[in-house]
Image: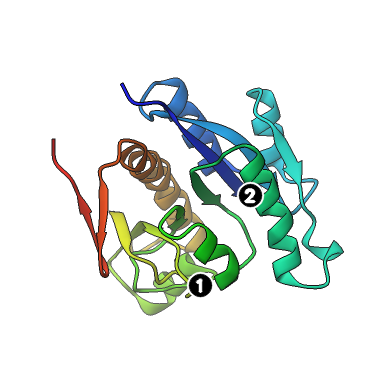
Amino acid sequence: MKMPKKIGVLVSGRGSNLQALIDAIKEKKINGEIAIVISNKADAFALKRAENNGIKTAVVDHRKYSTREDFEKDIIEHLEREKVELVCLAGFMRVLTPYFVSRYRNRIINIHPALLPSFPGVNAQKQAIDYGVKISGCTVHFVDEGTDTGPIILQKAVVVNDNDDEHSLAERILKEEHKAYAEAVSLFCDDKLEIEGRKVIIKKE
């Protein structure tokens, strides 16, 4: 058995995807451990989830920094101190600069509530409803310098019902997000992901 990989999770809100990762680690579905949870908001409920599970937390308030890079330098210090190997974004509402992305190239994972490349950015579920698509879902991807443009690791589809609004659709997508995120992080921790250009190859046994 390989050593568990150290994971750092960046959050801004309630942290339901963080909870999904915590639960999957407890259930031994992920060979990793969450070394630290960092939020840019002191009142993020995600921090409570971390504390309830004995996970170290830190608040790095973006408003206290004159540049985005200074803000990120402080986050990186926390991550380095904990020897973090994988950075997971779980509802982290700040766009990372190329400085941060290059520091953790191919080691930052995000989850997005749409089937990328459709509906990137904010309010993806509303975008899907407004466009009238019949199928939406979620995407776990590596983070690059663009917005939701990095290589795709996993996707899960969700049927859009005629009577769906953005909230009912978001709720059903979220259930799939929890499964997909844990699955993708598990693959990363087992060294089963290989990036070839835009493609992520999942290595078989």
Q: Name the foreground residue: 118 vs 190.
A: 190
- Image coordinates for residue 32, horizontal then vertical, percent: 44, 31
Instruction: Estimate how packed mark 1 is, as few (under 14), some (14 to 19) or many (20 or more) residues with alpha carbons within 10 Å.
Output: few
Name the foreground residue: 153 vs 131.
153
Name the residue at the left extreme. 205
* 3 left or right of 154 in image: right
Q: Is residue 43 visible?
A: yes
Residue ID at (86%, 62%): 64
Q: Amino acid at mark 2?
A: Val
Numbered mark located on residue 11 in the image: 2
Mark 2 and mark 1 in contact? Answer it, CB < 8 Å: no
Residue 33 point in image, percent of width and height: 50, 29
Q: Which is nearer the eye, 159 or 107?
A: 107
Residue 12 seen anywhere in this rendered image of the structure? no
Residue 55 position in % (x across, y down) = 65, 28
CA distance separating discs 2 and 1: 17 Å
User: Nearest the camera: 26 or 168?
Assistant: 26
Query: Which residue appears at 80% of the width and 47% of the height?
Result: 42
Residue tagged 1: 121
Identify the residue at image location x=51%, y=48%. 88
Q: How many marks?
A: 2
In this rendering, position of residue 190 left or right of residue 101: left
Q: Residue at x 33, y 40 (%)?
A: 183
Q: Amino acid at mark 1?
A: Gly
Q: Is residue 89 above or below residue 151?
A: above
Instruction: Identify the image quadrant of residue 9.
Output: top right
**Mark found first going from the N terminus, 2 or 1:** 2
Q: Is residue 155 left or right of residue 168?
A: left
